[in-house]
Amino acid sequence: MQPEELLKRLNSEPSLAKPDTSLAIEEGLSKGDRTLLQIKPSEDEDNETGVLSHVKCEKIVSSRPGSGSGPTRSPSDTSSRPYSADSRAVGGRTESNNGPRTTEDESEESFVWKSRIIPVLQELESPTHDNIFSSNSLEQLCDACDRLHRILDESNLLGRKCRRRAILLKTLFKLIDMGSDQLNLQLTRLILALSVTGNNLLNVCKLIFKISRSENNDSLFQNSSIIDSLLSVLCSENIFSIAEALLYCMGTLKFLSGNSSILKLLQNKGAVSILLHLTKKLKLKPNKCPVLGIYSTLRNLADLPQSRLEFLSNSGFPELCVILEQHSNDKDICMNVARVLRFSLDFHCGCVSTISKKCSCMLLFLVLLPCHSHSGDLVVRIVFTLGNLTAKNNEAREQFFTEKGSVDTLLGLFHTYLEMGFTPENNQRRPSEVEDVLIKLIRVLANLSIHPTVGTALASKQECIDLLVKVLEYKSIDECEELVINAAATINNLSYYPAENSVVRAKQLHIAELLLRLLLSNNMEAVLEATRVFGNFSQTKEIRDFILQKHVYKFMTVLLDSKNQDVCFSACGVLINLTADKTSRTILREGGIQKLIDCLRDFGPVDWQLAGLVCKTLWNYSEESAAFSFGEEETKSLLQLLSVFLDENIATHWNLSEDFKEFHKACWETEFVPVAQKLMNRIQNQYSVLEPLGTPS
């Protein structure tokens, strides 16, 4: 059977078995024919066959029937006893002390059997014989299973230590015929504790898997320690001999990890370290055991912030990169592993440093992207991960850039998806998959351009600039908001580097024309990015003339009233460059001076860098004569503000955190005081030499 056929069968058919004795078991469950469900302990459970084929075990169900694959659910939280990762036996008790039993041991076991176990077995057998099934009898049976488990544990008879183990198993398997999910979980927990193998282990894992397919049964798993038993199966010594049972175990954990409460329970029980340890074993024989379910569960666990340190401490990222390399042609595995990396790297600097230094993931991603270039859902995950890697780590930016063909690979995808993006969409509100890929691709380029060497190289790359300009030409801010803003932000980063061969600077006039549309939009984020670009471009005479001709300076003075620190900062940057040119200083006479003073009053105490920019703009404007540059009221207001803000006791007396106080004071001393003091001295000196006119006669 092909993997796709097994996948379809597991998702659509109540029966989960193959055409062997277990088929009758599963069909009996699905059809309600309990006469077929006489599960007996397998007589050859110790004579297991070899490893299952790759085709049989490779795939697992993608989602629960009718549940979809959306966000995790959040039923009530409950807890169960912690799981010990040191337990190696299936039942949670190690068998390292299994030696020859003495007569005294056998006598003690006989006493326990007769006095304590037989009465419980009689309770378990009576409802089956009488065919009585009610809520009361169900609770009694579950309680009896609990008591039996406790008795066996206290008497050291779990595992394979009990001489009458076959009788126990026969009784327990018969009860499965009653068809209660609650009771069956109690039974399977006890059966696993008796260290079954072979077909018995497989049938039990199938049954647990079948129960887990219904979300309504999640509370049963929360209120039971069956999760401990499942994790113990994953810790088995020879996982390749129980490959098919492992398939159903992983399917169960995948389903359960979709529940937010059970997900936290799994994390608390050490599921991350157990699954990562399992991947280390599986990579030795990557084609002989199911792996998809493991990475689906790890993907969900990676959503929890507390799991990310476990990935670091267990060398999870190098292991995941090895898996990616081994299964580079398997889209499903690549999707899940990429998502694990995506969430684990999200705003976690420790993870970024580790993966960039110890993993060859950069090169691996560059191999995967061309292979799966038309699988948008996988491309977007890989590119998003690259965006996280390069967001705050300069070393990662340089490492990616130096990989052979890295930029060409990104630009090739950029070109492909941009062409696909010109296909009309059905007016979707949310970004299409194509647009989503473009957004993440441009984000990577923006992050890379922060590195001076990389930024300079990208700014001089014709194809890169042409593609970014094409986005501004053909995409509107109203239809593709995030895409257009990202493109403008990337151009802003690249416009910072004034190299002679810069393509950005060569195309700056055309780009400035395109940015006018953003300045006129109602999107403040788009206005901010456009203003930042004008701040860099306005260092050149060509763009300063453009700003005057198109009256862009009027937008800049209006933006001073925006009450937005970032917007005011960028607008001041443009005005500084304009007032540095003597021919364009008159622009501030149209209400600009008072707006700058208001901006200084509003933001000075909380942003000394912005206050310093305001003072630099006023300094440039008043270069020829401060006395004639400002009106009388403007002069009085400005001098009053400067004298207050230059008083250290007043300027640094703000309710700020200790860490920020030092930064705040440093900015005041270096960014504001030097220029503010010079500006105040200039105004005072020039006004003091003026003599008042006498009274007319």
Image: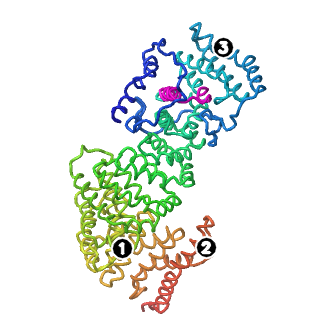
Stretch of the chain drawn in magenta: 189-211
Classify mark 3: residues with Cα within 10 Å, few (<14), some (14-19) or many (20+): some
The answer to whether any part of residue 216 appears in the image is: no
How many numbered tags mark residues here?
3
Task: Find numbered disc 2 in the image and state the secondary structure of the residue it sits on.
Answer: helix
Q: Nearer the viewer, mark 2 or mark 1?
A: 1
Q: Quick check: 360 above or below 88?
A: below
The answer to whether any part of residue 562 appears in the image is: yes
Find disc 2 in the rendering and name its residue: 650
Task: Find numbered disc 3 in the image and state the secondary structure of the residue it sits on.
Answer: helix
Q: Which mark is residue 215?
A: none
Q: Position of residue 589 (x, y in %)?
A: 35, 77
- Residue type at mark 3? Glu
Q: Which mark is residue 123?
A: 3
Q: Quick check: 383 above or below 333?
A: below
- Dominant SS type (magenta): helix
**Residue at point 48%, 13% (across, down):** 34
Q: Quick check: 31 above or below 584?
A: above
Classify mark 1: residues with Cα within 10 Å, few (<14), some (14-19) or many (20+): many
Q: Position of residue 210 (x, y in %)?
A: 47, 27
The answer to which image quadrant residue 540 occupies is bottom left
